[in-house]
Image: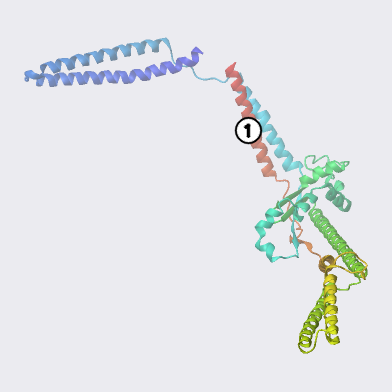
């Protein structure tokens, strides 16, 4: 501890002593100059007292500077200059750790990448799911539709998950035998190859290394890159992925068609049963009431009443005319009175029929209740007929949609055939390995020195 402090103190004292000596010399020169100026200006008796005070202040400052100079010389004598720095054991340990934990692994990684790792060829394909259905309203309200369907997965989302699934790996493995191809360089290229007896779960894990998927949820575009030890094989993998994706889209289409047809047929059957029930209820009403159409029947009855009203008016006029020409006991007057009474009785009977079904109808309900029931049955029949027509239209539309492929896989990048090996990316892997090893080693050295300083 004394050796580390000695150089700084001695150098500081020497450097601080030099400006002090210069300050002392400048003070002396200033004092001598002022003394000469004072002698030259001594002729003015009024300034004599001010010169004496200035001389006293200068002498005090010079004395203080001399005292500080003596103190600096004394401290420099106690702390001599520092000795030259030398390498110690901990310094050699840090250098050795750098070689062991940074340089050696970096050399090993680059040696493996450039001499052991086999070249891999990359094939790229891109596709998206398109639909033939086009709606102007959905285009105008696209923003609202996106909010409304935010919780529903699109066909592109389904394909994105399907390509990474075990089912896709199994389908491609059955066509191309993935284990045989990717295990041909095992165990030489142990970092980028797979062992021959890998299980399906391990093959799915390895699938995520050799097949890279890029998906844009906004546009629905999917881009797939497959790497293999052979260019034709990598192209075959992308073609197999494209074919399996097309099969899955066709399956979704078929399921959508069957669901649409099933729902339309079920709606049509329900509408047909409702129509049958409505017509049967109306037929039972007509059979029970013996009235085909209460509206037409009431119109006929109203015509009869109007006719009776006209006959009653005519009979009353004839009766009045007859009374004016003959006596009250005349037989014609009695016959006219009898005719008027019969017409009035008939009018009362017709009016009673409007509020009661009468004895000739097999029902005890009044006529307004029958009319209300008929109107209800007629409305049910009309609604059942409209529902049946709508169900027929929906079935025709579903059948029309089912007759064509509403969704299909649109390929915007055909599976490419590589001419040069692009994997493994040796420069990038080597650079990242060097960066991370250097970073970890630096953190370790900092932790070591932090613990050492605290202890």
Is residue 37 found left or right of 334 in the rendered image? left
Q: Residue at x 18, y 17 (%)?
A: 54
> Which residue is disc 1 drawn over?
439
Is residue 206 found left or right of 39 in the rendered image? right
Q: Residue 341, percent across and down?
A: 84, 78
Q: Decide if residue 218 is in sight here.
A: no
Within 10 Å of disc 1 (Cα), the crowding (few <14, some 14-19, many 20+) is: few
Closest to the observer: 452 or 387?
387
Closest to the observer: 35 or 454?
454
Asked if 298 appears above or below 189 in the picture, the reply is: below
Q: Decide if residue 135 is in sight here.
A: yes
Q: Residue at x 9, y 21 (%)?
A: 41
Q: Residue 295, percent across and down?
A: 82, 73
Asked if 358 appears above or below 69 in the picture, the reply is: below
Closest to the observer: 147 or 343?
343
Q: Residue at x 85, y 76 (%)?
A: 346
Total marks placed = 1
């Amino acid at each position: 501890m004394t050796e580390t402090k000695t150089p700084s103190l001695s150098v500081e004292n020497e450097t601080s002593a030099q400006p002090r000596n210069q300050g002392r010399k400048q003070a002396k020169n200033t004092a001598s100059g002022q003394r000469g100026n004072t002698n030259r200006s001594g002729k003015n008796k009024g300034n004599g007292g001010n010169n004496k005070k200035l001389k006293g202040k200068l002498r005090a400052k010079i004395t203080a500077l001399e005292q500080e100079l003596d103190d600096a010389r004394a401290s420099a004598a106690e702390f001599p200059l520092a000795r030259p720095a030398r390498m110690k054991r901990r310094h050699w340990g840090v250098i050795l750790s750098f070689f062991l934990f940074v340089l050696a692994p970096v050399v090993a990684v680059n040696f493996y990448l450039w001499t052991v790792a086999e070249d891999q060829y990359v094939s790229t394909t891109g596709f998206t799911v398109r639909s033939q259905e086009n709606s102007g309203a959905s285009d105008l309200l696209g923003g609202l539709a996106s909010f409304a369907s935010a919780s529903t997965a699109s066909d592109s989302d389904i394909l994105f998950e399907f390509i990474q699934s075990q089912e896709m790996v199994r389908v491609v493995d059955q066509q191309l035998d993935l284990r045989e191809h990717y295990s041909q360089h095992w165990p030489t290229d142990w970092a980028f190859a797979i062992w021959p007896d890998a299980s399906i779960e391990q093959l799915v894990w390895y699938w995520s290394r050799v097949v890279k998927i890029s998906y844009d949820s906004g546009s629905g575009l999917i881009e797939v890159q497959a790497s293999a030890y052979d260019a034709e094989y990598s192209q075959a993998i992308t073609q197999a992925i494209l074919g399996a994706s097309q099969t899955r889209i066709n399956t979704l289409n078929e399921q959508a068609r069957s669901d649409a047809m099933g729902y339309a047929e079920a709606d049509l059957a329900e509408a047909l049963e409702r129509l049958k029930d409505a017509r049967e209820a109306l037929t039972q009403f007509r059979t029970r009431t013996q009235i085909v159409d209460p509206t037409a029947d009431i119109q006929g009855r109203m015509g009869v009443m109007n006719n009776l009203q006209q006959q009653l008016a005519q009979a009353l006029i004839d009766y009045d005319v007859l009374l004016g020409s003959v006596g009250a006991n005349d037989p014609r007057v009695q016959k006219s009175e009898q005719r008027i009474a019969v017409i009035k009785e008939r009018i009362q009977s017709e009016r009673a029929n409007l509020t009661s079904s009468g004895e000739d109808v097999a029902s005890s309900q009044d006529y307004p209740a029958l009319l209300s029931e008929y109107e209800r049955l007629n409305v049910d029949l009309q609604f059942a007929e409209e529902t049946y027509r709508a169900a027929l239209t929906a079935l025709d539309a579903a059948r029309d949609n089912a007759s064509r492929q509403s969704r299909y896989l649109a390929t915007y990048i055909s599976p490419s055939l590589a001419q040069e090996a692009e994997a493994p990316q040796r420069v990038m892997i080597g650079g990242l390995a060097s960066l991370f090893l250097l970073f970890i080693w630096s953190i370790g050295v900092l932790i070591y020195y932090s613990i050492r300083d605290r202890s």
